[in-house]
Image: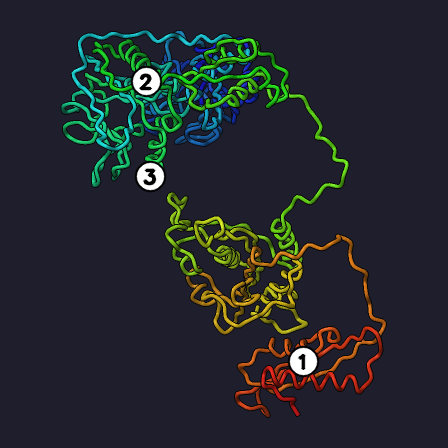
Amino acid sequence: MKFTLSWLKDHLDTSATLDEIVDTLTRIGLEVEGVEDPASKLSGFSIAYVVSAEQHPNADKLKVCMVDTGKGEPVQVVCGAPNARTGMKSVFSPPGTYIPAKNITLAIAPVRGVESRGMLCSEFELEISDEHDGIIDLPSDAPVGMPYADYAGLNDPVIDVNLTPNRPDCTGVAGIARDLAAAGLGRLKTPAVPSIAGEGPCPVTVTLDFGDTPSLCPGFALRLVSGVKNGSSPAWMQRRLNAIGLRPINALVDITNYVTFDRGRPLHVFDAAKIEGNLTVRRAREGESIVALDGKTYALNDSICVIADGRGLESIAGIMGGEHSGCDDDTTDVLIESALWEPLNIARTGRALGINTDARYRFERGVDPAFMVPGIDLATQLVTELCGGKPSETFVVGGVTAAPEVLDLPAHEVARLTGLATSLAESADILERLGFGVIRKPDALAVTAPTWRPDIEGKADLVEEVMRIVGVDAIPVTALPREAHVPQPVLTVLQKRTRLAKRSLAARGLMEAVTWSFIAKTQAERFGGGQPTLSLANPIAADLSDMRPSLLPGLIAAGQRNADRGTGDVALFEVGQIFRGDRPEDQKIAASGIRRGQARPGGFGRHWSAPASTVSVFDAKEDALTLLAALGAPVASFQIVSGAPSWYHPGRSGTIQLGPQNVIGWFGELHPSALEALDADGPVVGFEIILDAIPVPKPKATKTRGVLALSPFQPVTRDFAFLVARKVRAADIIKAAQGVDKKLISGVSIFDIYEGKGIGEDQKSVAVQVVLQPQDRTLTDVEIDAVAAKIVTEVGKKTGATLRG
């Protein structure tokens, strides 16, 4: 919401400085985003007198002007404006001045062989209008040397306030002035709107036709003003509209824009000559469309409210008028509309059509229903003053009917909720200054919210009004009570895992990435998603249409972007939400990572000490298992089975699970077709661990660490080479060997796998090392041999393996 300082002072009698106004606005909840000082942008421009304007010797359309700037000798300026002439007064900019419209800084330079020491400017070059056919022609009494911004009244600061959605009353300058007056920064002086009776009934009537469906228009007011003369709006109105970023169009349209920002009351004007018959407010029909004032054609449906006449659609209600019935310089009879629209429907319509207008901004927040008729009276007053004409009576259908709700504010409520020691009388004064109706009782207030405050629903809202006017800075600082006992942990297991996962993966050399939670539908389908329930109703981009079912698409795309910019060896990770459905339990927390090119865990890129090698499935497996170990998961109990979802390579991937019903995650090389769907190059390996699926550790009786028990006896290692069928998993051999004696056998690891000469075609040799760690005595050879024999027997029974000779 933008407005100028002088505009504010039309409604607020105050001697406060600009800084005081800005500070107060932010203090009472109307955050000021910025203040623009147009005088600083125009600081180099001053009024000058053209002493002479002679024909340029080398160009027919140029003139050489001698210009008196009021600062010494006349300055020579080469000018191409057709209206440049001897004796005129215009606006001069010296060398070093920045020209806003052209984004240039002037310098002394020859123009067709004649030196020019400045520039005579048009309104377009100063960005105060679109007029560029000639330089500014000022009256003869304009003082030479005076800054043009001061002379033209362009030194009016512009204040930009960031409104919260619950403050529709402050979408007009009058509402902001009301709040400032309530905060003690002046006296509210918003002029009253005179009631205009009009002559004769309005020849056009309005019907609200919604059939059996809910009404989308609570009220509608319409008035005809005949015999108007449309043209340019006055300079003061154009300056204010220009200052807040609105382009003046013509007097009728500018008046509606002015009332929109002055009182927060959007209006619309129809050229009455272009309206056939009466108006009907209804839902659009399937297949209907309209060419709006922005020149675009919009396809409508029955969820959208429209205004139609006997010919067809004339307006998208509350959003934008139609091009057909718009007012132009030839308009002589105008219909002024002031209506009420259902806020939620306006918001949905605006989002569906992708239209953002000042009217939509206000209607979707809720305008003052009691100002519907006064709003049309105010517009009528301005139209008759600026364009002439005779108004008819106002045709009104619907309007405000519900009585305002009375809310009780107990005397102690402000102190209870805020800590402010505010008396009941002070609270009543503040609410009355804000426009609330207040009945004072001994121990409470009976408060009625004004019609322009639809956000007031309960006594807590009244307390908030008192608090923001008194000031949040007035709330006493109170220290939180110190607990006598040791505080209990507040983080959940999942929160702890999330933090620890990030630290663990970063420690392995992976860089953290934060990617979009949305991906393209084709990508979502390729990675197990794409359900209709996960499609966004209003995506921010066409390729961000679905909630992500996996973190991998975003990471792969990020890795490819790095590769496209010359960094092909990249390792990334992310910990975040993934979505498998629209239920709360379908949202999971995952930790995923990728490695690309030669981004191996031991070091990235090529090195002279070892041959170059690209990432492999075992790098991803190592990342996944290291992460699980860091999270305290029971890694020894996990089963690693071959195969993974379809976006992994079927022969170079695996699944980590605790039984087939509890899948913890996956790892492996990404399938070429999955990379193709993301327009990415390989090789890329990755993993994804579902943190929610990791079993929660059982609570321990004590938080104290157990006693460190180190065996004083020497461990014993034995190597075994088994011949086994190729289809047998190495993990099955380890599991079988480990199960022989879980107390004595402290570790089983594979150190060699061989296939080829000397081995059957369907066989492989798997060599394992078994570590025996006695706790109470040194093992004898007989005991060691007995354990070794059990290992051979057990592995043979479980996997069909035989000891290799």
User: What residue is shown with label 3?
Assistant: 352
Q: Nearer the viewer, mark 1 or mark 3?
A: 1
| The quarter of the displayed image where residue 621 is located | bottom right
- The residue carrying pointer 3 sits among few (fewer than 14), some (14 to 19) or many (20 or more) residues within 10 Å by Cα, namely some
In the image, residue 167 sits, relative to residue 298, either above or below, namely: above
Q: x, y percentage for residue 312?
A: 17, 31
User: What residue is shown with label 1?
Assistant: 768
Left or right of 741 on screen, residue 379: left
Q: Helix, strand, or loop for circle 3?
A: helix
The residue closer to the viewer here, 775 or 218, is 775
Amino acid type of the residue tagged 3 in the rendering: Ala
Q: CA distance from mark 1 to mark 2?
A: 87 Å
Badge 1 or badge 3: first in the primary sequence: 3
- The residue carrying pointer 2 sits among few (fewer than 14), some (14 to 19) or many (20 or more) residues within 10 Å by Cα, namely few
Question: Looking at the image, can residue 56 be seen?
Answer: no
The quadrant of the picture occupied by the C terminus is bottom right
Residue at position x 38%, y 48% in the image: 542
Residue at position x 37%, y 44% in the image: 537
Badge 2 or badge 3: first in the primary sequence: 3
Question: Looking at the image, can residue 734 be seen?
Answer: yes
Q: CA distance from mark 1 to mark 3?
A: 65 Å
The residue closer to the viewer here, 494 or 439, is 439
Q: Nearer the viewer, mark 1 or mark 2?
A: 2
Q: x, y percentage for residue 465?
A: 52, 19
Residue at position x 31%, y 23% in the image: 340
Q: Helix, strand, or loop for circle 1?
A: strand
* Mark drawn on residue 347: none
* Mark drawn on residue 401: 2
Amino acid type of the residue tagged 1 in the rendering: Val
